[in-house]
Image (cartoon, rainbow, N blue to C red):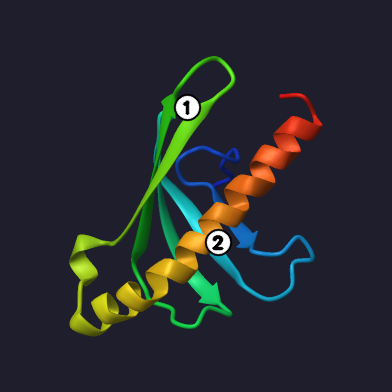
Amino acid sequence: MNAHVYKDGTVGSVRRCFKDISENGIWWDEEILETNYNAYRKLSVYNMHGFPFSTKCLITEQHYTSINKKQCVVSFVLRFDEKEVSFLGQFKMYFSAYFIASIFEDNLRNIKDENEQFGS
């Protein structure tokens, strides 16, 4: 069996993500589907644990727009893979969107704090 090893941050790489630094509670897996360095990433989000709702075939797109050399604006799009849209899935997404948005906001705050701590 041949296993592919992907460099973290490249197309095909997979990682496990945790909402809390203790790695308890809410967690999920992500696979990078597309990337354009410092501009765009498209991820598949799956294997969700601890969410009030979970769904299959969730896609997130992350857009990065530079303001200056040290700042950028990050925007997120959360959607379903076009092949897997169902009424129940849309219903779950609608009610989960606010919860998922709070996780993104927490992660961005953590990244900002860490960057400021290390002077990046």
* Image height of 20 relative to 63, above or below: below
Name the residue rendered at 45%, 41% in the picture. Answer: 11
Residue type at numbered disc 1: Asn
Mark closest to the chain's N terminus, 1 or 2: 1
Q: Are marks 1 and 2 in contact (CB under 8 Å)?
A: no
Residue 85 screen position, x and y as percent: 20, 72
Where's the C terminus, which quadrant? top right
Name the residue rendered at 61%, 52% in the picture. Answer: 107
Evaluate whether residue 74 shows in this view.
Answer: yes
Residue 33 screen position, x and y as percent: 39, 47
Residue 109 screen position, x and y as percent: 63, 47
Name the residue rendered at 44%, 82% in the picture. Answer: 53
Where's the N terminus, which quadrant? bottom right
Q: Which residue is mark 1?
A: 38
Front residue of 60/83: it is 60
Residue 106 screen position, x and y as percent: 61, 55
Name the residue rendered at 55%, 24% in the picture. Answer: 71
Task: For marks 1 and 2, give the CA distance.
Answer: 21 Å
Whether residue 6 sits left or right of residue 114 in the image: it is left
Give the label on residue 103, or none: 2
Give the label on residue 102, or none: none
